[in-house]
Image: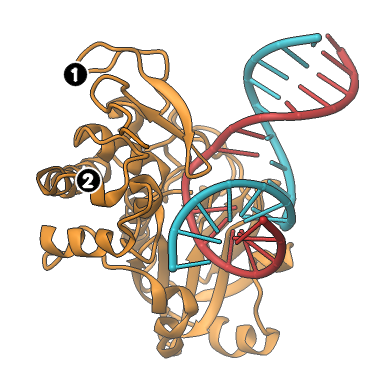
Chain colours: A orange, B cyan, C red
DNA sequence: CACTTGACCTGTCCGC
DNA sequence: TGCGGACAGGTCAAGT
């Protein structure tokens, strides 16, 4: 899916559009995309006014004035696209838009607001979901009980980072970065980018990485996440922001999806391998494979 | 306990 | 042009 920077970009966009909107109707065509009790939808969603759009890890939270919230996970291919009253169909969307007329065949949930605007949840692979839950119950979702700290929060220090990584010191560092219970929000793109920046091979066991490099990884990961938010996230395939537009971080990526191209630091050809069950990009010169006996 | 694999889905790309 | 297989930004469950 969208990882932290993409979800945050969507959040910022939606926060500009949605507060104050009143839900008039909701449509859905795939039960797993919107698994809710119809009675709750009728009572706590229809007629509800949107207060605020928040994010925790890779999950979006749309708070309503009914003490309920829409909880949304985009997973791999989810999109949340806002359209104003007369923008639902139509021509004239800019070239950087992946989404044209809506709803389309990937739209599995959409909301109509009383002012004529709409919010579309599109999801090609149908892994994502929208759930309506009492706001006080959101933190008690299994995922939120277990999820790690936000890597960009002010009180998240390099000491916290290293301490949490060391809880799985015998594991491959890439697998640990992808584990949402260790640190929230990092996925395949930013794991690869961060490990390249800190010159760590993704198969290195956490305990074998020198502390100085772990500190470097902390700094670089935060920097790459921040840069990507500034660039509106990464569009590799499906990702678009709340306006249906692509992000531009991919053109700044150093290794992700750049196999066969030169490493920007040393010129060595970037390779793609498999680590922790995921496609993994690295520079074999800057990130030498650890010696394993 | 930690790692791997499969499942959830659809679409695209690549080799034959 | 068609077909089969691998693969795609994420998580969860089950198996080893």
**Spot occupied by residue A58 in the image (x, y as percentages of width and height):** 40, 60
- Residue tagged 1: A265
Name the residue at 41% across, 71% down.
Answer: A61
Image quadrant occupied by the C terminus of chain A: top left
Q: Chain of mark 2?
A: A
Dot 1: element: loop
* Disc number placed over residue A222 in the picture, else none: none
**Spot occupied by residue A80 in the image (x, y as percentages of width and height):** 49, 55
Dot 2: element: helix
Where is A100 relative to A27, above or below? above
- 1 and 2 marks on the same chain: yes
Q: Which corner quadrant of the image does residue A185 belong to?
A: bottom left
- Near mark 2 (Cα within 10 A), the count class, few <14, some 14-19 or many ≥20, is many
Name the residue at 56% across, 49% down.
Answer: A88
Residues under labels 1 and 2: Cα distance?
17 Å
- Residue tagged 2: A221
Q: Chain of mark 1?
A: A
Q: Which residue appears farthest toward the front when viewing the image?
A: A293
Could you tell whether A20 is left or right of A215 in the image? Answer: right
Name the residue at 12% across, 68% down.
Answer: A155
Pick the front one: A92 or A95? A95
Where is A104 relative to A261, above or below? below
Name the residue at 47% across, 28% down.
Answer: A273
Could you tell whether A152 is left or right of A184 in the image? Answer: left
Label 1 with label 2: CB-CB less than 8 Å: no
Where is A151 relative to A36, above or below? above
Residue A246 seen in the figure: yes
**Lower sequence index among marks 1 and 2:** 2
Residue A115 seen in the figure: no
Q: What is the number of callouts on the image?
A: 2
**Spot occupied by residue A171 in the image (x, y as percentages of width and height):** 38, 52
Pick the front one: A239 or A104? A239
């Amino acid at each position: 899916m969208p990882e932290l920077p993409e979800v945050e970009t969507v959040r910022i966009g939606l926060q500009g559009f949605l507060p104050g909107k009143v839900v008039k109707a909701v449509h859905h065509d795939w039960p797993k995309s919107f698994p809710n009790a119809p009675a709750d939808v009728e009572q706590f969603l229809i007629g509800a006014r949107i207060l605020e759009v928040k994010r925790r890890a890779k999950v979006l939270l749309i708070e309503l004035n009914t003490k309920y919230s829409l909880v949304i996970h985009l997973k791999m291919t989810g999109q949340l696209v806002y359209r104003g009253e007369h923008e639902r169909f139509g021509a004239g969307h800019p070239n950087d838009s992946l989404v044209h007329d809506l709803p389309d065949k990937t739209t599995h949930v959409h909301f109509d607001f009383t002012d004529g605007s709409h919010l579309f949840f599109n999801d090609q692979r149908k892994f994502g979901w929208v759930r309506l839950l009492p706001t006080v119950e959101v933190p008690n979702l299994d995922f939120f009980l277990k999820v790690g700290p936000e890597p960009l929060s002010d009180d998240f220090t390099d000491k916290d980072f290293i301490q949490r990584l060391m809880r799985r010191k015998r594991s491959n560092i890439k697998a640990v970065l992808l584990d949402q219970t260790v640190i929230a929000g990092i996925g395949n793109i930013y794991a690869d980018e961060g490990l390249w920046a800190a010159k760590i091979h993704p198969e290195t066991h956490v305990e074998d990485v020198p502390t100085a490099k772990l500190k470097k990884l902390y700094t670089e990961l935060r920097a790459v996440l921040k840069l990507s938010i500034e660039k509106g996230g990464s569009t590799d395939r499906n990702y678009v922001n709340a306006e249906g537009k692509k992000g531009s971080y991919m053109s700044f990526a150093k290794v992700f999806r750049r196999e066969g191209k030169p490493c920007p630091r040393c010129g060595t050809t970037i390779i793609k391998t498999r680590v922790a069950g995921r496609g993994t990009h690295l520079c074999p010169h800057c990130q030498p494979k650890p010696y394993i006996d």
